[in-house]
Amino acid sequence: MEHYELKAYERGFKRVAGVDEAGRGPLAGPVVAAAVIFPEGYQNDEIKDSKKLTARQRDRLYKVLKNDAVAIGLGIVESSVIDKINILQAALLAMKEAIGDLSVEPDCLLIDGNQRVHLSIEQQTIVDGDALCLSIAAASIIAKVSRDQIMEIYHRQYPYYNFLKNKGYGTKEHRDAIKQHGCCKIHRQSFAPVRDSLEQGELF
């Protein structure tokens, strides 16, 4: 998992940041990105792609990462912006914000996926990076836990949709709630199930 970081260190980089996002697919809520810089040589075999961890494991590792990382940055792009610029551009914007939020400026970026961020910093895109690269996997955990925390807050504001359980994803329960109650202000109006509801004049 440290292969990409080690290669960057061999090339002379000192502050290597892994970058990933969470929340491209949901019908509601923000897309959240994180950037993580570890000390050179850092290892932790427990860090994996957030999707391969239980919620309890993610929460525990979130605390470990907060303690072990040199710097962690977070970027949050809300649903209203997603609707204006589309989800891909919103995810890239969240990544850019997460990098800018780092307390230590990185000199190399390892980015999950195949899209570069619009910054003049050396960067490498890695498809399935959250499964292959330690710092990207760490960023996936920070982004996922952070987004879940946000959706728990929204659950208290909009309990009809059970965001506490579905985190905004389009489960049958969530879709049925949209049909019954209409949409709320954090729903992504450009996403088809939400757009169809709005065409029927349903906004909570």
Image (tube, helix red, strand yellow):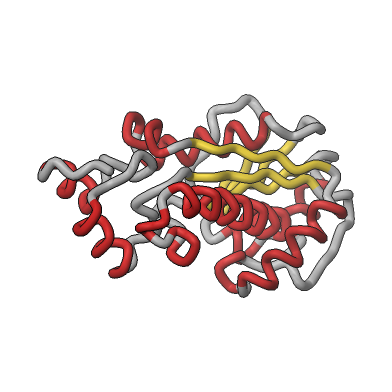
The residue lying at 34 percent from left, 52 percent from top is 27
91 or 11, nearer to the observer: 91
Residue 64 in percent (x, y) is at 82, 60
Left or right of 85, for residue 131: right
Vertical order, 82 against 112 (above or below): above
Residue 33 visible at all: yes
The residue lying at 62 percent from left, 51 percent from top is 146
In the image, farthest residue toward the left: 200
Vertical order, 121 against 5 (above or below): above
Left or right of 58, for residue 151: left
The residue lying at 78 percent from left, 30 percent from top is 105
Q: Quadrant of the N terminus?
A: bottom right
Residue 166 in percent (x, y) is at 43, 64
Residue 21 visible at all: no
Q: Quadrant of the C terminus?
A: top left
Vertical order, 12 against 129 (above or below): above
174 or 37, nearer to the observer: 174
124 or 98, nearer to the observer: 98
Residue 135 in percent (x, y) is at 72, 54
Left or right of 25, for residue 130: right
In the image, farthest residue toward the top: 120
The residue lying at 72 percent from left, 60 percent from top is 134
Res 80 quadrant in image: top left
Residue 136 in percent (x, y) is at 66, 54
Res 83 quadrant in image: top left
